[in-house]
Each structure stands twice: as structure tokens, then as C-alpha cells.
Amino acid sequence: MDWMPQAIREGILTILFISGPLVVLAAGLGLSVGIVQAATQVQEQTLGSAIKIIGLFIAILIGGFYMFSYMKRFATESFTRAFRLVTSLGQYVKPRDN
């Protein structure tokens, strides 16, 4: 069962690779809006949220296809590896005799 830690590691790296840029972008946008709000003393709560939502929406529009293709490739490789492993074990579930 040494394939399981590798599968978990690849899954975590896939999650980080797909969501990491979006999280960094949201943090950067929030920081920059916070700095501008502190400098201008405009304390509107919806301004920061609206800019983050619009920024993330644009980022998903630009990079969404790449994120989807990366996730699709990961899922295909994982299922292929899992089904290959299950069939190579040669162990089958047999019904119990009553």
C-alpha cells in the first residue's frame, strides 16, 4: 500500500496548485484595497469585497480552462492508476456461502 501516500501527496499538491494563485490574488487585492481605504479614510465594507469578487472572477475566466485541464489530467491519472492496481492484485470479492 505504498501508493497511497504518493496519491495523497499528489492530491494536496494539485489542490495547492489550483487554488494557490487565487488565494494569493485575493490576499493581494484585499491588502491593496485596505491600504487605499486607510489612506483615503473611506471605510466602505462592500468596496473591498466587490473588488476581490471581480478580480477573482476575471482570474477564473482567464485561468479557469488551465485549472480544469490540470484537474482533469490529475483525475484521469488517479483513476487509471487505481483501476490498474485493483486489477493487478488479483483479489476478488466472493459471495459467502450460507
Image (cartoon, rainbow, N blue to C red):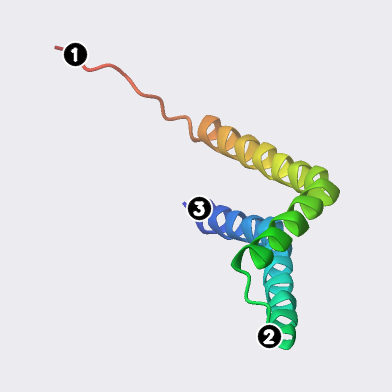
User: Could you tell which of marks 2 and 1 lies nearer the N-terminus?
Assistant: 2
- The kind of secondary structure element at disc 2 is helix
Please report the residue visible at 75 percent of the width from the left and 81 percent of the height from the top: 36
Q: Which residue is mark 3?
A: 4
Q: Nearer the viewer, residue 13 or 59?
A: 59
User: Could you tell which of marks 3 and 1 lies nearer the N-terminus?
Assistant: 3
Please report the residue visible at 70 percent of the width from the left and 62 percent of the height from the top: 52
User: Could you tell which of marks 2 and 3 lies nearer the N-terminus?
Assistant: 3
Q: Amino acid at mark 3?
A: Met
The residues tagged by marks 2 and 3 sit, at their Cα atoms, a distance apart of: 49 Å
Q: Amino acid at mark 1?
A: Asp
Q: Residue furthest left?
A: 98
The dot on residue 38 is 2
Q: Amino acid at mark 2?
A: Ala
**In the image, residue 52 above or below residue 66:** below
**In the image, residue 26 above or below residue 18:** below
Q: Please state if 2 lies on the left or on the right of 94 as rendered.
A: right
Where in the figure is residue 96, as x and y percent of width and height? 22, 17
Q: Residues within 10 Å of mark 1 (few under 14, many from 20)?
A: few
- The kind of secondary structure element at disc 1 is loop
The residues tagged by marks 2 and 1 sit, at their Cα atoms, a distance apart of: 75 Å
Q: Which residue is mark 1?
A: 97
Between disc 2 and disc 1, the foreground one is: 2
Where in the figure is residue 18, as x and y percent of width and height? 70, 56
Q: Residues within 10 Å of mark 3 (few under 14, many from 20)?
A: few
